[in-house]
Image (cartoon, rainbow, N blue to C red):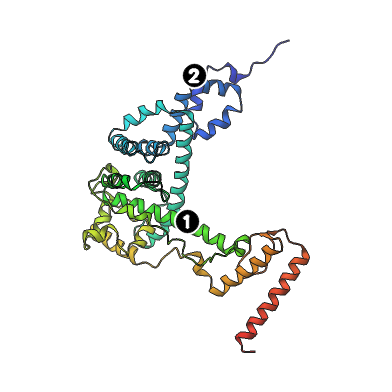
Amino acid sequence: MSTTMDPLSQLPLHVISQVLEHLDTIQQLGVIILSHRVFYSALKDSPQSIASSILIRQVPRAVLPFSIALLKSTQINKRDVNALTQVLSNLEAAILVSTDTIASLSKLSLSDYAFLSRAYAAVDSLRTSMFEQIVPLINECGLNHSTTLSPDESFRLDRAFIRYQIMCNLFCYPPGVITSSHQDELQILRCRFFSVFSPWVNEQLVCVYAYLRRSVGDAFDQLGAHDVEWGQLPIQWGLDVNQTPRVQWFFKALSCPLDGSQDSTQSGPGRMWLQTHSEQSFFQSVWGPIDDNLWDRAYVIWDSQNITDSRLREISERLRHQPTSFPAYKRTWSKGDIRQSELQRADIYLVGGRGYWPQKSIDFTHVHGLTEEGKRWMTEKWRKESEYQKGKALGM
């Protein structure tokens, strides 16, 4: 009896490997090798070649040095000043000679490749989300940006997001982790982290930080506003979640650029930064108290080669003085609404309910764990409380 050979099994492994090398991410590789034994055999035959090819296709070459530095920043002892110094030295060298970065990929493990792929996928998602949020705002002020990012703009955002995480990995510690004897050495390294880049490149980092802070704050506000369990906690939702130790302190250091062609003094960010701060003192241009709107609109990200200096100055002033486009969610609630929601969610929690509670309406659709009797009891209780408050306000 004749048997039919599986067509895939008849292909040489090097051909299968070439197919795998064209996957978009390392994560897809894990799914593919489970679908057919020939894919697993090809990966086992040449894991480094396949993984490095996928990564090089996924991560732009100019971004790779920063991605590798991010990986290394997760693998060192933060108390080892020599190790921190080596991460920064390798990053600076790799920025100048990108071929060395490609060569270094051969030394990575599959788990390293998976980390790099996941990290860049996260950066890609954040970049897209930030651009979609901000581009309507900058267009209102006359920048007239297209609906897509240019390669240089994508690179600036990628670099800023990754540098932000590297900064956190290397220099942001819980209290008590670093002894006073290491503080001076670490301060030198902190300054070095920023001093090799120009002011506008360091402010690109500030811009992505403003976006991340805003996104986390919004998520926190949504939790505080609607989560039933939050309503019974002795924590005021109205507190400002941004009043934390200022990571932004790190952004103040400035010096000579190591920015690449994307951020030369004649680039869009370089010219925009210069025109924005041309009438300010040096130190005001580093950390100005009126620059929140500029960072919210990522003013040092965008290309602007075809815009005159005077027009850039005009646009920057409009960006700077626009009303905020990102009011905190809690500011859309009155104090009375906040208090009422907290009390209602506390009642729901105490009778066993959990889930999401909407604003200004009694809707148990997204609350679970309640009996119909419990719902009726609370509805009647809140009705009486509302009538009492109205009567009190009218002096009755």
The residue most toward the top is 1
Relative to 13, does residue 255 appear above or below in the rendering?
A: below
Mark number, residue 215: 1
Q: Residues within 10 Å of mark 1 (few under 14, many from 20)?
A: some
Mark 2 residue type: His
Query: In the picture, which quadrant includes the N terminus?
Result: top right
Specify the label residue 258 is tagged with. Answer: none
Residue 44 in the image: state x and y as whole percent: 52, 21
Residue bearing the label numbered 2: 14
- The quadrant where residue 77 appears: top left
Q: Residue at x 26, y 59 (%)?
A: 285
Residue at 36%, 29% (x, y): give it.
Answer: 102
Residue 365, picture quadrant: bottom right
User: Count of labels shown?
Assistant: 2
In this image, 328 relative to 256: left or right?
right
Chain-order first, disc 2 or disc 1: 2
Residue sitting farthest toward the bottom: 396
- Residue 267: x and y, percent? 27, 49
**Left-right relation of 357 to 292:** right
Q: Position of residue 280 (x, y in %)?
A: 22, 62
In the displayed orientation, state which residue is furthest to the right: 373
Q: Is residue 191 above or below residue 295?
A: above
> How far apart are labels 2 and 1 at the CA level?
45 Å
Q: In the image shown, does 88 or 196 lie closer to the viewer?
A: 88
Element assignment for label 2: helix
Disc 1 residue type (three-letter): Ser
Q: Callout 2: few (<14), some (14-19), or many (20+) C-alpha neighbours within 10 Å?
A: few
- The answer to which of 41 and 19 lies nearer the viewer is 41
Is 373 on the left or on the right of 134, as rendered?
right
Residue 363 visible within the image: no
